[in-house]
Every structure is written in structure tokens, then in C-alpha cells.
Image (cartoon, rainbow, N blue to C red):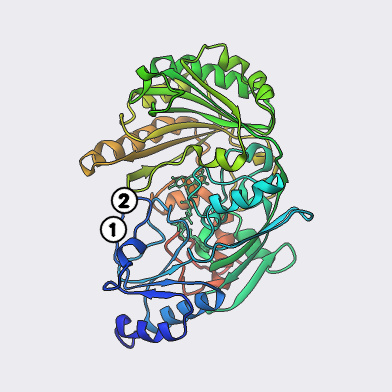
Amino acid sequence: MTTHSPYAAAADLRHQFAGSVLTPDDHGYDGARTIFNAMIDRKPAVIAQCTNTADVRAALAFADRTGLEVAVRGGGHSVAGSSLTEGGLVVDLRRMRSITIDSDAHTAVVEGGATWSDFDRACQPHGLGTTGGRMSSTGVAGLTLGGGSGWFERKFGLACDSLLSVDLVTADGVEIRASEDEHQDLFWALHGGGGNFGVATRLTFRLHPLPVTSLALLFWEAERGPEVLAAYRGLVVPGVTEDLGGAVIYLTGPPEEFVPAELQGKRSVACLGIYAGTAAELRDVLAPMLALQPDGVLLNEMPYCDIQCALDDPPGLRNYWSGEHLVALPDEALRRIDEQGMSMPCPTASQYLLLPWGGAVTAGARNWPQPHRNAEWVVHPFGLWEDAADDAYGISWVRNTIAAMRPYSTGAVYLNFIGDEGMDRVIAGYGQENYARLAAVKMEYDPRNVFHLYHNIHPAAAARRS
Ligand SMILES: Cc1cc2nc3c(=O)[nH]c(=O)nc-3n(C[C@H](O)[C@H](O)[C@H](O)COP(=O)(O)OP(=O)(O)OC[C@H]3O[C@@H](n4cnc5c(N)ncnc54)[C@H](O)[C@@H]3O)c2cc1C
């Protein structure tokens, strides 16, 4: 299939392309190939900065003609760098970010390169929203197609639970709409199967009323971790209101006014509360945590779009993370969380999060591809540091943390929270049965496995039922 140099062929692509086509000598090429994880440094042959669906189709036809590997780029937050290819073609969607809100129908139509910041800011004036990424620069499509975990998941389910339809361009350039009524199997697969099936150019979401939201961030010195963890488990386990999202987080105290000076730059433990309601209500809900007399307290009403970017990490750091779903949280599990929190690389931007699931995450399961919705808790060691010399320690901290929690794990994992951990983990993320069904959908829509850089589902014919 490879007929001529991709650089020469890129000149052809430019003629039929409304956006920009960058090759390594072009101004802006290096900026355009930079992604969130500074550990990933790959040089694509061509970056096709699409402005519309016709550009996406032209870019995919170009890849077909030249035989270049295809990467699809949205927010650039894949920890494994699945939106970047060495020597291949990047279908870059960052110029496709329009968002249309229908405030009567409570829907949002979102282009494939929009970020959660774009989305939340468009929704805010209407008092509407949905579960979105915990960092506002994450791509809407990348996060949602992988499932989409966020602060309001206990209230609204994962981001994919609010999907109404996805417009997709397949590797052969065919435009398809997947919804409850059209291409139902593909629609099912797009609730967690990630970027395996095509380029999502437009996603339609159901929106939910979110007129008032509040944020609380309570800080203690890290030595108080065991008490904070136990109190948080006691708050959530009896079935705290689904209006409350959040986490217990081990982190380096940031240089913020509400963090006491003695905790800034030091290992700390925090309780984060994100609430669909007033600050007074949030104060009541968090009473058991406030009773532990935090050293620093921020508790305010805040627009949802501001909450969503309040904890944004800077790009340009080195990333390694993983996750595990837990069936239970006995005292020994809390002890291990504390032990790993106390060994987290510090001072760095790393975090170790204990996230409660349940609520609408479990209720919204609907047999979607991710079978682990009944997990009660998720642990997410999120390693971020600056210096390559710290890679060995940071990576081993993440791996040890996950190993320590394995005895309490469902055996599954939420794939958006991990990098490349091998095929067994991908299958564990879906379960054997769902993986086989996804492979059959893949066979129908991408039999050549053109879209293989996200946690790859290999095309395979459906097993015959006897
Ligand atoms: C700082 C940070 C915070 C995060 N927080 C969360 C979180 O709270 N919850 C959560 O669930 N995940 C979270 N993630 C993980 C994130 O959701 C996934 O890595 C997701 O795939 C990123 O999507 P992206 O578009 O930003 O990234 P990209 O690297 O651009 O893309 C990631 C993958 O999605 C595919 N993709 C992107 N856009 C499209 C599209 N339009 N059509 C088809 N395929 C597409 C790409 O091909 C690629 O394989 C976080 C990641 C980071 C770095």
C-alpha cells in the first residue's frame, strides 16, 4: 500500500484539506506533537489538523494510501501516549471544538476535539452539566469513549451513561451515527471501548440540572491519614447522598492561601467534597470530616465550571499511573492505603486518591462493556514528577501501591486510569465475555485494526453459539 514518501504525499493532502498539514520541518510541528505526559516523545511523519469531518475523511484516506499508522488526538491526556505515533499520521481534532447547547431539550452536541473546559463553560450559563473529567484540559471524546469517571459520577453515572449518540468516521471513511436506534452494537461498544472503532467527530449528551454547586477541600498533616481514611469510609459506607462526590487524597500541600504554611510543600492528606447543592448543605454532609478539625479549610459555593478546573495539574510533567477497583475496604486495606500514601513521591504533583463509587455508577451499568460497576471503591495512584531521574522511584511506587491493594480488588480495572499494562489488564477491564463481544464489533467496523493505539481490542469474528 505504501507508494511514496509521506512527506511528498503530505503535499497532496494539503490540496484537499481545509485545516493545516504539518511535517517535521514546519513551524509549529514540535508544539503540535507535545502531549500531557512529558515522558512520551514521538515524532509523527504528518500531523493533520482537521477542521471538519471532510478533513477527517481526507486524513484517513491519506493514511490508507501511504500505509502510515494512525493516531487520533483529542485532549492529549492518554498516559501511554496513544494519541501520538512515531513516524505515522496524527489525526488532530483540536480545531474541532464547537459545542451547541439546547437548554430546552437539555442536550449538548460536542465536536470530537473539545475539552471538558470547553464543555463545562458552555453548559454553565444554562445551569446544566454532566459528569466530566477531573482535569479540565482532558478531551471530552477520549474520556467518554473510555467510560468517563468524574466527581459527579455517583449522581449522574459515568460520562458515557449520558451519551445519546456518536457520529463516527470509520477507517474506510464511512460516516456513521451510533445511538439507541442506529448501529446499536457499536453504540454499546462506545460506552467504554475507547478509540478502537473510528474517529468520533460529534457526540450528543443528555444534560442534567446543576444550578448550585459547592466545593470543600479540608487539609491535615499526613500523619492524620488513618483517622481521615476511617472517618471517610464511615461517612460514605452507610450510603451518603449521591449529591456528594470527592475523594481522600494524599498529596503535597499546594502553595495556596487556604493551606496552612506548615503544610505547603509537605506531604498532606485532604478530603475533597464536590457537592450538588449549597455550601451550608455541604458543611452538614461533611460534619464527620470537619469534626476531625482540619488544619486548613476551603468550603464555598462555586460554579461547576470553576470547580472542574480548580485542581488542574500543569502539563509538562512526567506521568505514570494506575488503578484498581475494590470490593471492600477493611481496616487492613486502609492501613495499606496510608502506608502507600506515606511513601508517595513528595514534594511532587503526585496524588494518591481513594474514590467512592456506588450510586449512579452501579445503577447505570446497563450491561455496558465495563463490568466492574459494582465496585465500592477505586484507588488511583497518580504519579506526576518533573525529573527523569525520579522515574524509577515514581513507577515503582505506583506498581507497589497497586500490588498492595490486589487482595481487595475486583480483578478489574478502569482502563482510562492506566497506561500500557499488557493485554491481560485490557481483558480484565472488560471481562472475557464483553471483550469477545467488543472484538466482534471491532471486526465489523475496523477489521484492519487501523485504530489500535488505545487499549487495543483485536478484531475477531463472534464465536458461534451452539
Ligand atoms: C491529568 C489527567 C487527568 C485525568 N482525569 C481523568 C478522570 O478524571 N476521569 C477519567 O475517566 N479519565 C481521566 N484521565 C484519563 C483520560 O480520560 C484518558 O486518558 C482519555 O483517553 C484522554 O482523552 P484525551 O482526548 O484527553 O487524550 P488523547 O491522548 O488525545 O486521546 C486518548 C485516546 O482517546 C482517543 N480519542 C481521543 N479523541 C477521540 C475521538 N474524537 N475519536 C476517537 N478516539 C478519540 C485517542 O485516539 C487516544 O487513543 C485523565 C488523564 C489525565 C492526563
Q: Exactly how many numbered labels are in the figure?
A: 2
In the rendered image, which quarter contains the N terminus? bottom left
Q: Residue at x 79, y 54 (%)?
A: 104
Mark number, residue 38: 2
Residue 436 visible in rendering? yes
Which of these two is toward me, 116 or 146? 116
Dot 2 alpha-carbon crowd within 10 angstroms: few under 14, some 14 to 19, many 20 or more: some
For residue 110, what is the image quadrant?
A: bottom right
- Image location (x, y in percent) of residue 166: 63, 64
Please state which of residues 183 and 102 is positioned toward the viewer in this rendering.
102
Mark 2 near mark 1, Cβ–Cβ under 8 Å? yes
Look at label 2 and name its amino acid: Ala
Give the answer, above or below, for where 446 lies relative to 341.
below
- Please tell me which residue lies in front, 304 or 225: 304
Percent x, y of residue 335: 43, 19
Q: Quadrant of the C terminus?
A: bottom right
Quick check: 44 above or below 211?
below
Question: Which amino acid type is marked by label 1?
Answer: Asp
Name the residue furthest left.
389
Q: Quadrant of residue 300?
A: top right
The image position of residue 453, as x and y in percent, is 42, 62
Residue 174 position, x and y percent, is 58, 78
Question: Element type at marker 2?
Answer: loop
- Image point (68%, 51%), residue name: 162
Mark 1 Cα shell of 10 Å, populated few (<14), some (14-19), many (≥20) = some
Compute the Cα span from label 2 to label 1: 7 Å
Q: Is mark 2 within 8 Å of ligand 1?
A: no
Could you tell me which secondary element the residue under label 1 belongs to? Answer: loop
Q: Which mark is residue 41?
A: 1
